[in-house]
Amino acid sequence: MMKSTIGLRQAHQSHSAMIMAMLCGMFFCSCVNAVRGPEHGQTEFLRSTGVDARSKLARLPFAHSWREPSLQPMQYENLIIRPVTTRYLDSSQWELSKSSAIPDARSYQRQVKSLAAYWDRSLKKAFRSPISAFYLVQNRNKPKTLIMEVAMTEVVFGSPYGPLGIATSPDGIAAEPSLHLPMVAFEIRVRDAATGRLIATSADRRANPIDGIKASEKNVPLANQKICDTWSEQLMQASNRELFPKVQGSLLAPY
């Protein structure tokens, strides 16, 4: 009788796992391909510029992009990258990231700060590339210098996932599928260091599918870091785009 009960339970768990996989697969396809307007989540960081957040330059792979029409790109050769700020991020949404690794708002804030620091390093690494059109500097009084300000405006770390993006319980049994993929949104302002004149703005929002990443204090932000790394490379290429190569499209899905 006991063996029969165990067998029924295992069959039920197997059937539940299969259903969850199907549901998650359907949700995954619809979620990562969903596109929201570029104005979604726009904060005072970008609103203060007065630039229409619906504008987009077709040659750049961001939901919003704008450049001063009269800009002569060759007049600049130096770039200051300010530390990535999380000041404009709405931390009240932290429960979208709730997991064993992020049980409370304080843990969420700690992960967000860590991700911002990671992206700051990633951006500077990308702009130190030999193919970058700019030299990274720290002195704003240096001639021909631009200042890039970056705001991380939304962050969702997602929940513990198993293969195919199925949420799992600690014993590995399939649970309900999570509705929250890892996601990051940013807004950027670029100004002339000498005059403060607005040169360019950009914004984007991306989700990254998880491939069997288990949540823990160590690896919970890995999927988010991948989004930031992709943006770092694209932003460096975008700075070149006015002078040299075409920017490669993103491998990540708009969210």
Image: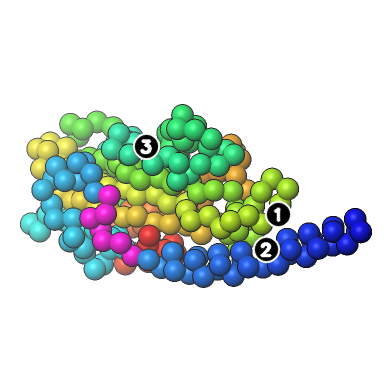
The residue indicated by pointer 1 is: 173
Q: Main secondary structure of the magenta part?
A: loop
Instruction: Specify whether 181 is left or right of 11.
Output: left
Q: Nearer the viewer, residue 237 or 24?
A: 24
Of the 4 image quadrants, the one containing the C terminus is bottom left
Q: Amino acid at mark 2?
A: Ala
Q: Amino acid at mark 3?
A: Ser
Q: Position of residue 201 (x, y in %)?
A: 20, 51
Q: Is residue 248 visible?
A: no
Q: Amino acid at mark 1?
A: Ile
Region rendered in magenta: 35-41
Residue displayed at 18% across by 31% down: 141
Q: Position of residue 132 (x, y in %)?
A: 34, 52
Q: CA distance from mark 3 to mark 1?
A: 31 Å
Disc 1 and disc 2 in contact, CB within 8 angstroms? yes
Q: Nearer the viewer, residue 115 or 212?
A: 212
Q: Earlier in the sequence, mark 2 or mark 3?
A: 2
Instruction: Specify whether 78 is left or right of 205.
Output: left
